[in-house]
Image: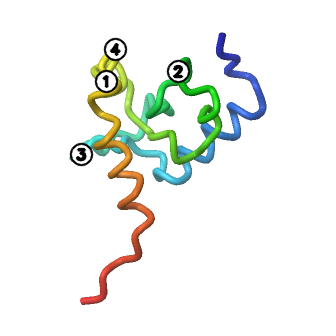
Amino acid sequence: MRNFQDPLYKKWRKEVYTRDNHQCQWPNCSIKKKLNAHHIKTWAEYPGLRFIVDNGITLCYLHHKMIKNMEALYEGVFFKIISDKKKPPKNK
């Protein structure tokens, strides 16, 4: 059972939102309200990754609901989005 008031969970969620600029990370979505911090590798199946920021991504309510029960299909896309955020900008 997940405790949304757990200080570790709250810290993880805040760090995910901050990294993602408090905006849905779904491609071409710019929603900044009704956000969810989504575990890329699921909470239930990967307890060791529950509080790893790089295992989280910010999604709006709509996109979070859309991927429910299909999370594994989106893992690669979400990890690529997170990875691309870490790359230094290319010099022009």
Please report the residue visible at 46 percent of the width from the left and 50 percent of the height from the top: 20
Give percent across and percent down for residue 23.
Answer: 41, 45
- Dot in front, 4 or 3: 4
Q: Earlier in the sequence, mark 1 or mark 3?
A: 3
Residue hosting label 2: 45
Q: Secondary structure at mark 4?
A: loop
Q: Quadrant of residue 92?
A: bottom left
Q: CA distance from mark 4 to mark 1?
A: 14 Å
From mark 1 to mark 3, how far is it between C-alphas? 13 Å
Q: In this rendering, which labeled residue sits more in front, label 2 or label 3?
A: 2
* Comparing labels 4 and 1, the label whose residue is closer to the camera: 4
Indicate the position of residue 80 as horizontal and vertical percent values: 33, 51
Mark toward the start of the polypeptide (1 vs 2): 2
Q: CA distance from mark 2 to mark 3?
A: 26 Å
Kindly identify which numbered label has been placed on residue 62.
Answer: 1
Give residue 12's quadrant in the image: top right
Do tag 4 and tag 3 residues touch (Cβ < 8 Å)? no
* Residue 66 versus residue 77 in the image, above or below: above
Mark 4 and mark 3: Cα distance apart in space: 20 Å
